């Protein structure tokens, strides 16, 4: 009798578990923004299809990122670049024999970390063949990579399908040379607002770039041998010591003094006019973005981790494919 009661309890808990596992509501569903993104995702999407999925993703990600922490920024950037072109559908991962896929576009040529995604996907194909999409793998790897360097955690609702199309001509990403109005339009087109723009820019706290992208800004901004007046002159002097006029390869930290730590220090740097890119400095030209930056400086980043988590969840819904849309690839770089 005791055994029967125990079995009944197990069955009951299983039924209750299924009934309370509700979909994660799509933040764009009730608005006209991002109209192509209507499906819901579910935190428990793989609960029965591949119960060990998140453990596998976390284990493999840790194996790669722990000895090479710079991969955290690279994988976060890859996820962002994926979502901003055709939505979060894993199309950034597709290879083309003609070098005309998204990953071949100039802004994506410096992306790193594909090997991490491939390794995670290979491990999942052994455990649960044909179940977990590459789009979901990338979203999870980006989150777990940031966790490895003690950054914030955010929930990753799942159930994305993989896109079959990847075109170099569509890889129109927010530019590091853009002004704030252009950036706001870029984000608005994806259903993201000004707060999302400034919060997600905070990911630059662990970012790096190269001298080539800032050379004209510090040496010849208007063609008269000058530097961008939006920059702190002392910061310009520091950058010139690192970057010679013809140097295009030397690495430059995007958050001077705190690039190894995921924190709110990026906002301090921007507030001190030490934003590396024009797009960083441009945030101060919008009252809402500037107020957010000032608030993070004044409060020492009191809400940044929470805000970042919320914006990352929102980003993860951009342009998603669900249901019978797209496919689930067995290899992330090849369309079926």
Image (cartoon, rainbow, N blue to C red):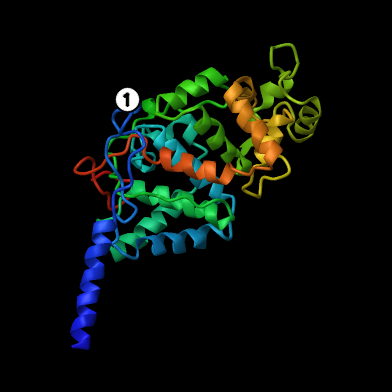
Q: Residue at x 21, y 86 (%)?
A: 3
In this image, 209 relative to 182: left or right?
right
Q: Quadrant of residue 280?
A: top right
Q: Residue at x 26, y 69 (%)?
A: 13
Q: Is residue 260 above or below residue 67?
A: above
Percent position of residue 192, x then y: 44, 30
Percent position of residue 221, x then y: 69, 17
Quadrant where the N terminus sits is bottom left
SS under mark 1: loop
Q: Is residue 160 above or below residue 243?
A: below
Question: Of 173 and 28, which appears nearest the observer?
Answer: 28
Percent position of residue 128, x then y: 27, 62
Q: Quadrant of residue 199?
A: top right
Asked if residue 252 shows in the view, the reply is no
Q: Quadrant of residue 322?
A: top left
In this image, 42 relative to 186: left or right?
left
Asked if residue 142 shows in the view, the reply is yes
Q: Residue at x 19, y 43 (%)?
A: 324
Residue occupied by mark 1: 32
Q: Residues within 10 Å of mark 1 (few under 14, many from 20)?
A: few
Q: Is residue 59 above or below residue 290?
A: below
Tag count: 1
Furthest residue to the bottom?
A: 1
């Amino acid at each position: 009798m005791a055994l029967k009661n125990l079995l009944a309890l197990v069955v009951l808990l299983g039924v209750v578990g299924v009934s309370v596992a509700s979909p994660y509501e799509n933040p764009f569903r009730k608005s006209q923004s991002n109209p192509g993104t209507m499906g819901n995702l579910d935190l428990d999407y793989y609960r029965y299809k591949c119960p060990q999925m998140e453990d596998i993703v976390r284990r493999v990600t840790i194996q790669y990122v722990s000895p090479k922490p710079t991969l955290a920024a690279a994988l976060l950037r890859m996820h962002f670049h994926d979502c901003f072109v055709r939505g979060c559908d894993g199309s950034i991962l597709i290879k083309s024999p003609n070098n005309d896929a998204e990953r071949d576009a100039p802004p994506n040529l410096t992306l790193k970390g594909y090997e991490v995604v491939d390794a995670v996907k290979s491990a999942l194909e052994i455990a649960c063949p044909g179940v977990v999409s590459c789009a979901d793998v990338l979203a999870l790897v980006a989150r777990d990579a940031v966790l490895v360097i003690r950054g914030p955690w955010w929930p990753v609702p799942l159930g994305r399908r993989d896109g079959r199309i990847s075109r170099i001509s569509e890889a129109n990403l927010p530019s590091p040379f853009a002004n704030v109005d252009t950036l706001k339009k870029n984000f608005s087109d994806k259903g993201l607002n000004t707060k999302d723009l400034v919060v997600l820019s905070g990911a630059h706290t662990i970012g790096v770039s190269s001298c080539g992208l800032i050379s004209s800004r510090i040496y010849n901004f208007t063609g008269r041998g000058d530097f961008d007046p939006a920059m702190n002159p002392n910061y310009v002097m520091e950058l010139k010591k690192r970057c010679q006029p013809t140097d295009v390869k030397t690495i430059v930290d995007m958050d001077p003094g705190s690039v190894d730590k995921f924190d709110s220090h990026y906002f301090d740097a921007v507030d001190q006019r030490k934003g590396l890119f024009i797009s960083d400095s441009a945030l101060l030209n919008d009252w809402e973005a500037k107020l957010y930056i000032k608030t993070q400086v004044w409060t020492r980043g009191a809400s940044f981790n929470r805000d970042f988590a919320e914006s990352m969840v929102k980003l993860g819904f951009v342009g998603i494919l669900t249901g019978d849309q797209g496919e689930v690839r067995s290899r992330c770089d090849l369309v079926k």
